[in-house]
Structure formats: C-alpha cells, structure tokens
Image (cartoon, rainbow, N blue to C red):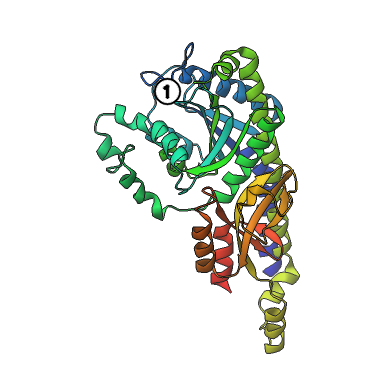
Amino acid sequence: MRRGIVFMLMCAVSVLLIASPNHFTVVIDPGHGGKDPGALGNNGREKDINLKVSLALGDLITQRFSDVKVVYTRTTDNYVTLQERAKLANKENGDIFICIHTNASRSSSAMGAETYVLGLAKSDANFEVAKRENSVILLEEGYKETYQGFDPTSPESYIMFEFMQATFFDQSVLVADCVQKELTQLKRQDRGVRQEIFWVLHQTKMPSVLIELGFISNKEEEKFLLSSEGQETMAKAICNAFERYKHEYDKRTFSQQKQITTQVKDTDILKYNQPVTSSDSEKNVAQEPKVVYKVQIFSTSKILKDSDSAFKGWKECDFYKENGLVKYTYGETSNYDTIISIKNKLKKDFKDAFIIAFYNGKKITVSEAKKLQQTN
C-alpha cells in the first residue's frame, strides 16, 4: 500500500516537473490610453510611448521564450481602468506584472529612468508620481464606489494601504533591480528602485513593477523615447531584465520541485512516521539556523568607502551582492518589531529603505521568514 502511494506521488511530481515551465505568464500593462493621454510633452503623448515600448517588449519576450505566455492589458489606443488592468492580470494568473509608464516633471532638466515597487515610502517626489499615475481614477464615473472611497489626490486616502500584504515584495524588488541594472548599462541616468503606492500594483496578486522610462518633459529624453530606435532600445533592456528574473525564477522553481521529489521517497515516509526522541529534538534545536532581518538602504554598482557621503553619516553599514549590484544594509536582528523600529529611524535619510530577511545566510522573502519563525 505504501509503495502504491509513493508511486502515485512520484507520478504527480513528474507531471509537475513537465508542466511547470509551460505555465509562466507575463502581463504587460501599457499605462494610460484612449481618453487618458498621460503626461504630455512638446511633441508627444505618454500613452503612445507606453504602448509602443510595451508591444515591442512583448514581441521580444515571445521570440526569446517559447515557454512564456504574454498578455497585454491593451494593444490599441483604448482606455482601460486601473481596476480592469489588475483584474485581467489576476484572471490570467500572471507570474509577473510589468507596468510601462513615462515620467514628467515641472523641471525640464529632470531626466533618467526609475522603477517602482509597491511600498509605503514617504517621499514627496515619489508621492507626486503616485498621485499622477493614480489620478486616472478620476476619469471614471462612480470611482469612489469602485475604488472603495480612495481619492488619489488625498494623502489621507493612502492610509488604507498601511495594512497591505507584502507577499510579493521581495520578488518585485528583484525584478526592479534587474530593470535598473539593464537601463543603467544603456547609460541612462539611474534614478534607482523606489517604493510608492500605486493602485494597480496593490491589486495585482503577483510580483509587480511600474517602470518610468524617462521624462517626456525633458527635450532630449522625449526625442529619444519618441524615436523607433529609443523605443526598441528600452524594450530590449526590459526584456534583458525579464530574462535575468526568469533565470532566477526557474532556478528557484527547480530547487523547490527537487525538494518535493526528495520528500516522497519511501525511506522519508518511514522516517516521518517514526517518533522523534528527545536527543534528536535537542540536536535539531542546537543546529537550527535563525532568521535575520536587515534594512536595505540603497544599492550601487560598486563597493563604497565607509566615509562615502552616500551613507549620510550612518556607521557600520553592511552589504551583500546580488544580480551584479552591491546592496547596502543597516542593522541586524531576529526580532521583526526591532527591525521595523530601525527602519523607521532610517527613513529620515533613506526614504526608500525596506526590510529584507536571511535564513542560514540565504536571502528569503520577509513573509517566508515570518512563517519560519511562527513554525519554530
């Protein structure tokens, strides 16, 4: 009987191993559209740039990856609500959501690319971008009912996001890091990975990023983003970033599937049914690695001196390397409440600081870290 169960489990795992690679879906969301032009430049409209880069990106992904399904929230110049965009992404069971936008500023000298993940960083500059991108909500009739009373122009309305789930935060930051690294290699000014509250990112149940390609309010950047060459260049960079992320995703998925396969061995089932002796229990406790939380304050392409002005006077900062970037952190504790307190103190100098977690020296998501601590 036991061997029959094992055989069935092994068959199920085999099906999983075969089927998983063919179930990766990327949802590409060209911001604005139709009656909502987005930001306006001297010669172009944001909605047009967003759509052309998005379509070029989708074509490149389709050409490079036979195992990836590409879904667009729009393929023409039509108006799609933020709610409809998120609803479509969730319905398609997307594995990643990439939202394409073009920035604007009152200053014509502002330039560069930046990538946003959903967060609660209180930065005036970030908040202005969030208000602009969320303001499309105001074009809808009955938006207060549809968006549960959310007013994109009111700072008070954003309090409702304080209890958001951070399930996909770490994965989203990984995507954003990959994007910024690729765009920086194009010698575009790097404005970094930022956090803010975007409705469409909050509503999607998958790793999600919002990319601001550049500033349409900057004469040179507008010219670049309106050109076919510029649009293709940006699409290639984002596709390269997607490839980086997909590589990490595939490695992690394979590792998880390997663990499942190992767990259904007959000997493992027999071990599972045996009682644990007190000596075994004590041994496990003694060897059990602990969860460690840190606050990531910024990332760079190189190692900095301790005296560098980027640290803003904060001493004893640490760093780790990931995806070709040097990521600096501050603080180290196994207590989640303590790391929140540390992050709050850092906020005055590092608006986009966020919490990360490690387990036995390996980076994991914060949600995974919490679950491990609850289990233990």
Question: Of the residues shown, which amino acid type is indicated by label 1?
Answer: Gly
Residue 201 seen in render: yes
Q: Position of residue 147 (x, y in %)?
A: 31, 40
Can residue 7 be seen?
no
The answer to whether 366 appears left or right of 137 in the picture is: right
Q: Residue at x 65, y 60 (%)?
A: 315
38 left or right of 56 in image: left
Query: Where is 206 relative to 40, above or below?
Result: below
Q: What residue do we see at 52% from left, 19% from top?
A: 49
Residue nearer the viewer, 145 or 14: 145
Residue at which label 1 appears = 38
* Viewer-nearest residue: 202 or 66: 202
* In the image: residue 190, left or right of residue 266: left
Q: Residue at x 51, y 60 (%)?
A: 345
Spot occupied by residue 20 in the image (x, y as percentages of width and height): 65, 44
The quarter of the picture where residue 236 lies is top right
For mark 1, give the secondary structure: loop
Query: What's the residue at 27%, 43% (across, down)?
Result: 149
Figure quadrant of residue 112: top right
